[in-house]
Image (cartoon, grey):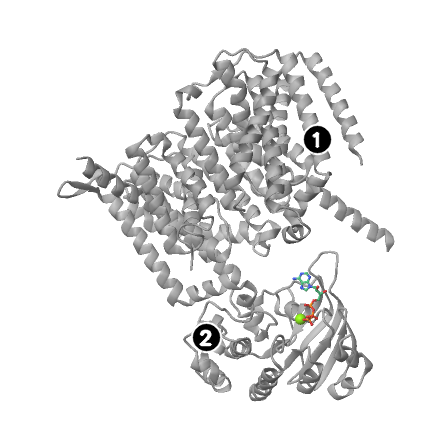
Amino acid sequence: MNLKKWVVSGVIAFILYMLFLRLTDAGFIANFIAYISLFVIAGQGWNLLGGYIGEISFGHAVFFGIGAYTVGLPVGYKLDINLLLLVLLGALMAGIFALIISYPLLRVQGFPFLVGTYGLGVVIRSIVVVTPALFATRGIFISTYSKNFTYPLIIGFAIAVVIFVQWLVNQDLGLRFKAVRDVPTAARMIGINIYKTKASAFVIGAMLTGLAGGLFALYGGFVNPSACFGDNTSIFILLGPYIGGIGSVLGALFGSTIVIILQEVARSVITVNGGHYLMVGALLVVVMMLSKEGIYPGIVKLVKKIKNAYQKRQGE
Amino acid sequence: MKILEVNQLKTGYDPEVDVLRGLSFSIEEEECVAMVGANGAGKSTLMKTISGILKPKSGEIFYRGQRIDGMLPHEIVNLGIVQVPEEGGTFPNLTIEENLMISCRRKKAKMERQKNLELVYQSFPQLLAKKGQLAGSLSGGQRKMLSIGKAIMESPEMLLLDDISMGLAPKVVEDLYRMLKDLTLKMDIPVLIVEQIVEIALDFAQRGYVMTQGEIVLEGSSAALLDTEAVQKIYIGT
Amino acid sequence: MEYTGLIQTILGGVGVGSVYALLGLAFALVFGKLKICSYMHGDLAILAAYLGYFIFTSIGLDPFLSLIVLIPIFFFIGYYIQVIFMKPFMSMEIWQGRYQAQIMVTWGLGMCIMAIEFIIWSGTYRMISVPYRNATLNFSNLTVPVVHLLSLGALLLIYLVLSLVLQKTDLGISFRACSVDRITAMLTGINYQKICAISFGISSAIAVVAGTFYALTHQITPAVGLELTFKGWVAVIIGGMGSLGGVILAGLLVGLVESLTSFFWIPALKEAVLFVGLLLLLIFRPGGLFKAK
Ligand SMILES: Nc1ncnc2c1ncn2[C@@H]1O[C@H](COP(=O)(O)OP(=O)(O)OP(=O)(O)O)[C@@H](O)[C@H]1O
Ligand SMILES: [Mg+2]
């Protein structure tokens, strides 16, 4: 298995980022890369269920928000707990919540699932918004670490998560994910428990997304309902893997990167509030029309096609 | 004049695998031609390609000199090529009458609607008795009758029959083919027939082709084909 | 006093629910029968609402009169959306990810529509202030908003016309034929893609009506589109996927749940209560409340 290659690339990427951080003195781009990395982590989590199992969740902001609020709430209540510990705890909380909520949600498939997850997002956000004990719409400020610690932390976690997912999908469990997606009947016949398999993808993915949320709290030093539990968060977590290539680690990685960059570019081009969705929507439509599986698998297929055509010509 | 001409046809469901691998044959005026072959040879695939359900990867199909590959299914029906498919063929959620009426789409068919309807009900009185009921309530044999009736309502100028006998009792099959023989004689149109039961197919047709794995391996008059080894093989079922 | 307030709330809920029911109807028409999954009808509805607003504020034409223009326009928009954007997915099977692909494309289109509305009209809440907006009919001590009566009437009318078309016309029979067996429909000489396009056109036209009534009862802002889409789908899920009558009842129920929550509890929680209800439904009756026969 070529996991070694992934680890080596990961280490190199981390070193390069550290150098870059030093050279640019934690400037805008270093900041932006950290921001993208948050969505890469969350997107990898989404992709476990959305890509490998094929159930689209429109509510992953819930797990993102749980991660973020697990860091934020103790700070809000002036409890002195190590922030890093809270980040890990946040991932755990997101996973536990996913385990509980998987019971109703995973009983349905396809778009009832999609609508259900969206609904879950609405419910949790509404609860936070109306509950003063959760600081309602005010949110919580967090005095966090310095950029020079937070950014590498995020990058490190992002690289670790990507490698972890790449490893996971080649384990027994990961192969079961794909079996459940592609040949559910056959999967059941060889004794795979469909519900359990889906639930594992859901829970592990939620933990990763929760991790991203916790890191987001450190990154921004602030949590509030709209930034953490907002539809926007769900949408951008989902769009990355979907546009980049569902069910592919690299695809999701590229996708999250492209989507977040495009979003920022669009915001600066179309300055009207909300207008940037024009470019995001157009990208989604174009990608889906050109390659149903997303950019990365589309390109892989294209390259293969060209190669085949070339070989054919050489043969003749 | 050649009614149907198929040239070097290649079709498949998967980009990598061809089911029909460069198949050619033709049908002359007022001719009834059988296409026989073992399970999975690609007979239904051929029928679907002629009707435009599947797009050929390469090759050509001509109908009365007009190129039809690449046309949409309903355009092909409009030209008068009507298929009685192997599966489906009727709409279980519509009544018998709706099933027949909805099949009346060509201009010619609309003009001959009354005549065709009488012909169908006369040939298959069982359908007349149940005309207000949903097609889903019919037996397998009756459903095939309805499927054939639908084809007749279209005033076909060429019929494609795909495995009429599939899933039916021998007695029912025999009756169906007797009626079909009458009908095609009355309508006087060319027929391409695919049939599991080789005997029936070759009895029905004047001429036949033998197909193996997407290619024509033999052709000849029905009588001559019946004695060949290739056909015997299919017949025995290997 | 409390009692009339409750009745009043129920009436209001049913009135608002008729908008959800219309959207649910639009979805169910193409989804239940033709397996076309759209996530853009809420945005189409809001676009129609904005156009109604624009026509009203610029030349003073009543939104109901502009419907006469908007309905055919949106029919053609829907028709061509199906032809251009949805056709490539029509031969996909469900297990090949047909719905996912359709959802993403329509959602992307919906996003574009929403962005354009943001660019033209900004996110500020807008209102069509027709004179009859607050008009009411009084029955003893009940006051019923006229607009709610009209939207219920429109809902009923559309349902009846739709049922009639489906039962009696050649188009309706072809539609039912396509819904049960695509290949056989094609072999019967039915232009399957055209039937799909017409259906998508009709469902878009229904969305226009929904949007107009929404604009007459609410203030509009672009982001509402996706919300409406989801509520329409909630109606479809509760209604048991596909039976048009069930979807209508479910849509009215959605409106009712929202207004009762606002009445008895906190308005900010009305959507939360709705979706909690949906999650409970998924546990106890995943097939929907009013299951199709
Ligand atoms: N929808 C499909 N998708 C993929 N492959 C298919 C499909 N339908 C048929 N095939 C394959 O194409 C080949 C030819 O099938 P086809 O149905 O044309 O055979 P046939 O000659 O009609 O057989 P039969 O006598 O059983 O009807 C078979 O190998 C079959 O597995
Ligand atoms: Mg066959």
Q: Relative to A13, is C268 on the left or the right?
A: left
Which residue is drawn at the image coordinates 34% and 59% (left, top)?
A: C161
Give whichever of C100, C214 is nearer the camera: C100
Label 2 vs label 1, nearer the camera: 1
Determine whether A224 is above or below B95 in the image. Answer: above
Rendering quarter of residue B38? bottom right
Q: Quadrant of ligand 1?
A: bottom right
Numbered badge on residue C256: none
Ligand 1 under 8 Å from disc 1 Cβ: no
Judge left or right: residue A181 versus residue A282. Answer: right
Chain to which the residue tagged by mark 1 belongs: A
Q: Residue furthest left?
A: C140
Q: x, y (%) of residue A201?
A: 62, 38
Residue A128 is drawn in which quadrant?
Answer: top left
Bin the neighbour count of mark 1 within 10 Å (Cα to Cα): few under 14, some 14-19, many 20 and up. Answer: some
| Mark 2 and mark 1: Cα distance apart in space | 60 Å
Measuring 76% from the left and 85% from the top, which residue is drawn there?
Answer: B226
Residue ID for mark 2:
B96
Residue A93 placed where, x, y %? 55, 26
Seen as rendered, the residue at the extreme right is: A315
CB at disc 2 and ligand 2 closer than 8 Å: no
What residue is disc 1 on? Answer: A164
Q: Give the residue type that dot 2 points to.
A: Ile
- Return the residue nearer the eye: A230 or A70: A70
Near mark 2 (Cα within 10 A), the count class, few <14, some 14-19 or many ≥20, is many
Regarding mark 2 in the picture, which secondary structure is present there? helix
In x, y percent, where is residue B128?
44, 82
Disc 2 is attached to a residue of which chain?
A: B
